[in-house]
Image (tube, rainbow, N blue to C red):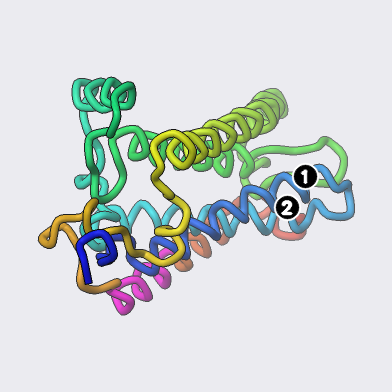
Amino acid sequence: MSVTEEKRLVWDLPLRVFHWLFALSIAASWATAEAGFEYMQYHFYLGYWMIGLVLFRIIWGFVGPRHARFANFLRGPSTLLKYLRSLKGGEPLNSAGHNPAGGLMVIVMMAMVAFQTGTGLFATDDIAWWGPYNPAVSGALAGKLTSLHHANFNMILGAVALHLLAIGFYWLVKKQNLVVPMFTGHKPAMWVAPHEAITSSQLLKALIVIVISIGLVYWLISAAPPEAVDAYSF
């Protein structure tokens, strides 16, 4: 097999599953929020689910395989600018895992969704739905957090649109398909040096991280003020 045909494993299975669940959850959150009052309960459940996803990704960013780790793809401003300048040329600077711009987008999306779920814990529609921690804050603060919750989701949609545009740019202009590797986990060998490939998805470790994430979400909801026990929440 030639180097142009050979594939090397870059994205571990837990990271790939997270990526697509994260994308689908954002779409489902938007759909349930827009669908009407009767779907709001599912919107809240999705909020808890996404807290778990964010917790998993944060922990996995420290203990997961090489290219899942934050230390592997977070770069300083000078490296980011150097990479962005390289996009004007023929071939961008090679990155086996996330490139500097993609790594920054990972952090931005994670931060925005963390903020979204965090404000959702205090949000209310002033009619029948309120987050489990809504009783812990004043009505005025709950109103501000609710407004931020709505405004931030529009920013998330904007970030998603930017992400899709970037994927299209790499596909059409740079002739690099970034979508297929996120399904298969493998990239062409010409992009990945032998020492940069990973050998395992570390599934047992991922299972432990999943259990920890579920436990943290359960603790977070269980620790909510008693007044919210009988209310639908997020």
Asked if the residue under mark 1 is in contact with the one under mark 2, i.e. CB atoms within 8 Å, the reply is yes
**Residue 39 location, x and y as percent?**
83, 54
**Residue 44 location, x and y as percent?**
70, 53
Q: Which residue is located at x 39 percent, y 37 percent?
A: 174
Q: Residues within 10 Å of mark 1 (few under 14, many from 20)?
A: some
Q: Of all residues shown, which one is farthest toward the front?
A: 2
Which residue is nearer to you in this view: 97 or 77? 97
Residue type marked 1: Ala
Circle number at residue 107: none
Magenta-colored stretch includes residue 203: yes
Along the horizontal axis of the image, is 21 left or right of 191? right
Secondary structure character of the magenta stretch overall: helix
Q: Of all residues shown, which one is farthest toward the bottom?
A: 204
Above or below: residue 13 compared with residue 73: below
Examine the image and state in which quarter residue 87 appears: top left
Q: Which residue is located at x 42 percent, y 55 percent?
A: 55
Examine the image and state in which quarter residue 6 appears: bottom left
**Residue 83 location, x and y as percent?**
26, 27
* Magenta residues, start to end: 202-213
Along the horizontal axis of the image, is 23 left or right of 85? right
Which residue is nearer to you in this view: 139 or 167? 167
Above or below: residue 135 compared with residue 11: above
Above or below: residue 218 compared with residue 30: below
The residue at which mark 2 appears reads as 43
Along the horizontal axis of the image, is 4 left or right of 172? left
